[in-house]
Amino acid sequence: MPKSTIKERRGSSQDMFAKLVAERTEMLTTFCRLAGIEPYTADKSVQQLLQEFCQILVDYVAAGHFALYERIVEGKERRREVAELAAEVYPRITQTTDLALDFNDKYDCGDHCTVLDSLSADLSRLGEELAMRIELEDRLLSSMTRR
């Protein structure tokens, strides 16, 4: 493969990775803002922040899918060590995706989220899962950016 093609592909990958990290940073910032307003009441400010967080969470999960996992799942990754690591971590990352989407389904309810009794526990569990996901993503990103 010509060096210019490799450089272009790496540049494109770097852009996707940067987008993923930016989405992740925004998600974590909003997660911390939301976690910091406990106890949770059904007032408008809590509902707005919860909706904002749900949207950013879904954007982050989607960015991960398109930046990393789609390439691997489709068999486009040629480096054996990256493919092996991906095979190891992808099932666990998929579990975090499922949990994030379940959280979104439960709390993405516009301005009518009135039952927030389990929000604290749900955020705690989600936070633990997101921490695991980030660790796995970082391992994968590191592997993919080695030359």
Image (cartoon, helix red, strand yellow):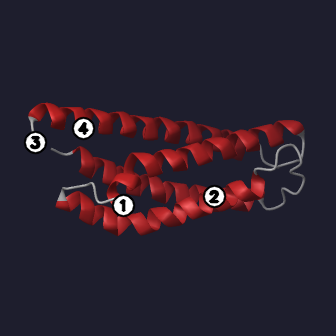
Between tags 2 and 4, which lies in front?
4
Element type at marker 3? loop
Tell me the residue that label 3 is attached to.
1
Q: Is residue 96 left or right of residue 69?
A: right
Amino acid at the residue labelled 3: Met
Q: Few, some or many C-alpha atoms within 10 Å of disc 2 (few <14, some 14-19, many ≥20)?
A: some
Q: Earlier in the sequence, mark 1 or mark 3?
A: 3
Label 2 vs 3, first from the N-terminus: 3
Asked if the residue at tag 4 contacts the one at tag 1, i.e. Cβ–Cβ closer than 8 Å, the answer is: no
Q: Earlier in the sequence, mark 1 or mark 2?
A: 1
Q: Quadrant of residue 10?
A: top left
Under circle 4, the secondary element is helix
Residue at 38% over, 38% down: 16
Q: CA distance from mark 1 to mark 2?
A: 20 Å
Would you call the spot at circle 4 few (<14 residues within 10 Å), some (14-19), or many (20 or more)? few
Point out which mark residue 9 bears.
Answer: 4
Alpha-carbon distance for marks 2 and 3?
Answer: 39 Å
* Label located before the other in sequence (1 or 4): 4
Which residue corresponds to the image point at 28% horizontal and 63% vertical from the top-left? 85
Q: Nearer the viewer, residue 27 or 59?
A: 59
Residue labelled with disc 2: 101
* Disc ID at residue 73: 1
Distance between the Cα atoms at labels 1 and 4?
Answer: 18 Å
| Residue 122: numbered disc | none
**140 vs 29: above or below:** below
Looking at the figure, which quarter contains the N terminus?
A: top left
